[in-house]
Image (tube, rainbow, N blue to C red):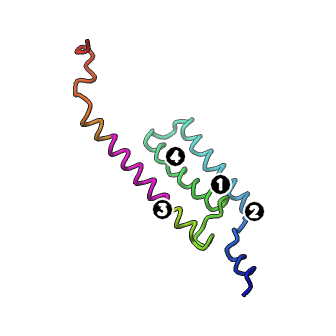
Amino acid sequence: MSADAHHDDLAPSHGTRKSYITGFLMSVVLTTVPFYLVMSGVLSNLATSLIVIALAVIQIIVHMIYFLHMDAKSEGGWNLMALIFTVVLVVITLTGSIWVMYHLVNNMMPVSVHDMSQMP
């Protein structure tokens, strides 16, 4: 096996015109649907929020697959491992931040903060 053959196995795979068009059309749909839901107000706020969040996550996946070419076999699987590590760190950071802010509000704010008659 030559060095060139080994190098070709690790080379990034570039998408075809069809895959780019498919990714683009999916991105347009995944952007248009939430925009319509928010602007028209056809669903409740909770349902709209959940659908928008779900479609945003799907759009992130579409971008990673069709435009960034990230899958289990790209770069020998290291891209996927780096992605999983990044997601874990983001979840830990967001969860910790929300937990700290929640406890700061509940434990540090005086009960009568909304009663403006007590202010000097």
* Amino acid tagged 1: Met
- Between disc 2 and disc 3, the foreground one is 3
Q: Which residues are magenta?
A: 85-101
Q: In the figure, is residue 50 to the left or right of 62?
A: left
Q: Is residue 44 shown in magenta?
A: no
Q: Nearer the viewer, residue 93 or 30?
A: 93
Image quadrant in which the N terminus is located: bottom right
* Amino acid tagged 4: Val
* Amino acid tagged 3: Phe
Q: Earlier in the sequence, mark 1 or mark 3?
A: 1
- Between disc 1 and disc 3, the foreground one is 3
Q: Are marks 2 and 3 in contact (CB under 8 Å)?
A: no
The residue at which mark 4 appears reads as 52
Q: Is residue 86 shown in magenta?
A: yes
Instruction: Single out the residue that lies furthest toward the top.
Output: 120
Disc 2 to disc 4, C-alpha distance: 27 Å
